[in-house]
Image (cartoon, rainbow, N blue to C red):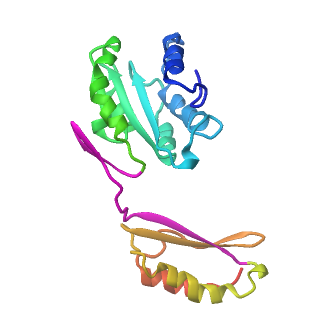
Amino acid sequence: MFSLDTYSSKAQVLEAVKALGFTGGELANIGLALDFVVGNHFTKAGGSRVEEGVPQVLVLISAGPSSDEIRDGVVALKQASVFSFGLGAQAASRAELQHIATDDNLVFTAPEFRSFGDLQEQLLPYIVGVAQRHIVLQPPTIVTQVIEVNKRDIVFLLDGSSKLGRPTSMLSETSLPRSSRGLEIGQDLIQVTVAQYADTVRPEFYFNSYPSKRDAIAAVRRMKPL
């Protein structure tokens, strides 16, 4: 209906929303809709400020169960790091809304579609409380905080060409092991993978190749220039 950057004031947004008419039709393809907003709205072209680190939030309002499969759309939301809420009328599938929402506590239901306005007092504190990294759900008080995240997936992508000026094996013996020294590497902690590139790309190992830091460092030391 409009993009994130179409209107510059609240008054303009409200005027545009009040002018909306229902699309109509017998089907309600939520899966298709999720794919669409990820590809068209949560992007720079769609007015999103995701590249500036601004939290991305989706509020899905549903009057009934989806007519299509939602799995791919949900995966797309998660990959785009979109914080999702689900609002549903009584006929909506709560299970679907829970699958789409970031947390079960972010699903709200009303007896009928026209009653959604009554949910605003429940919903707005959560929307205001969305933080980029973490949200603590303790209604009615919403506490946001930045926490240290122990799980990370880190890719070391190495220049394996002659432009490096020294053998890749030399680099692997110094920089990479030193970089990983302070990392808590493990399957439930930080996962590390290494690839080299020149005219082609060669993966040295994958995230799940080695269960311990010692094994990963040993694999790095065995690397040869691409």
Task: Report x, y in % for residue 79.
Answer: 50, 48
Name the residue: 32% across, 52% down: 145
Region in magenta: 133-160
Q: Residue at x 35, y 14 (%)?
A: 113
How many marks overall? 0
In the rendered view, tell whether residue 76 sits above or below residue 185.
above
| Residue drawn 58% across the image and 25% down it | 7
**Quadrant the N terminus occupies:** top right
Residue at 60% from the left image edge and 37% from the top image edge: 39
Q: Is residue 28 left or right of residue 47?
A: left
Quadrant containing the C terminus is: bottom right
Q: Is residue 24 shown to the viewer in this render? A: no
148 is within the stretch colored magenta: yes
In front of the other: 97 or 47 = 47
| Residue 6: image location, x then y, percent | 61, 26
Q: Is residue 175 left or right of residue 83?
A: right
Is there any visible trace of residue 70 in the rendered image?
yes
Report which quarter residue 3 is drawn in: top right
Judging depth in this view, the residue of 92 and 55 nearest the camera is: 55
10 is higher (above) or lower (below) than 41: above
Residue 97: % across, % down: 36, 31
Does residue 137 belong to the magenta stretch? yes
Residue 111, position in %: x, y? Answer: 26, 15
> Would residue 193 appear left or right of 203 to someone viewing this image?
left
Query: From what the image shows, is residue 12 above or below residue 60?
Result: above
